[in-house]
Image (cartoon, rainbow, N blue to C red):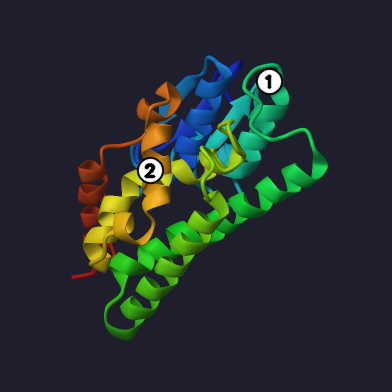
Amino acid sequence: MGEVDTKGVVLLDFWVSPFGQRCRIALAEKGVEYEYREEENLLGDKSPLLLESNPVHKKVPVLIHDGKAVCESLIIVQYIDESWPHRAPLLPADPYARAHARFWADFIDKKIYECGTRLWKLKGEGHSAAKEEFTGILKLLEGELGDKKYFAGDAFGFVDVALVPFVCWFYSFETYAGFSIEELAPKLVAWGKRCMERESVAKTLSDPHKVFEFVGVLKKRFGVE
């Protein structure tokens, strides 16, 4: 890919990206060594390698494996699971269980970040609607989790990887929404704490207060008072 050496495994990412953190967690679970390349100016001019590797969406994360680029976080996590299948399987072997996991990962992908963004971006009726919707999302996820250790049962898996990076965004969501996620979804918060006991998660997730500061940067960039 151009003159840049991208042999082996390279991850193009941005420190606070929950989508990139999914990939970092999956790589850590699999014990895959890789080169991390921070897209330092993601809100400005993006690197030539990122634009070349992901010309359609022009965003992180991108996994480059032996010079071939894989884009979109859930697709990357599945690629990692399939490319290094002999350690810490993330998707179950049973076809129905795999489909079930993909359904909930897709639900998380379409709902959490978009609705959470509206919590800090909107005011008035829009904010109230986002707050109500986010509460419903949490309730649905808590219902799916139930009393299980992880979403798939006793094994940390695909849905956990999809959702856990947003745990460090909970503080920001709570602050701007004016509610307590622990009061709304105590089992979900307890699950997040269990996940944080895993080295792959603890070493990857950002400090919630650093995330809050980053949201402040986004608010200024979008002219949100």
Question: Which three-letter amino acid code belongs to the residue tagged 2?
Answer: Ala
Q: Write the residue at 71% across / 21% down.
A: 85
Whether residue 1 is visible, yes or no, is: no
Up the image or down, 164 lies above or below 141; here it is above
Up the image or down, 6 lies above or below 16; here it is above
Question: Which residue is labeled 2 in the image?
Answer: 190
Whether residue 189 is visible, yes or no, is: yes
Q: Write the residue at 55% across / 29% down.
A: 26
Query: Where residue 185 sits in the image (x, y, percent)?
Result: 39, 57
Quarter occupied by the N terminus: top right
Q: Residue furthest right?
A: 95
The answer for how far apart the CA atoms under marks 2 and 1 are is 30 Å
Question: Which residue is labeled 1 in the image?
Answer: 84
Crowd tier of the residue under label 2, counting other residues whose Cα lies within 10 Å: few below 14, some 14–19, many 20 or above? few
Mark nearer the N terminus (2 vs 1): 1
Left or right: 142 as drawn, with respect to 185: right
Up the image or down, 71 lies above or below 185; here it is above
Query: Where residue 75 sits in the image (x, y, percent)?
Result: 65, 41
Quarter occupied by the C terminus: bottom left
Q: Are marks 2 and 1 in contact (CB under 8 Å)?
A: no
Q: Residue furthest bottom?
A: 125
Q: Write the residue at 37% across / 32% down.
A: 196
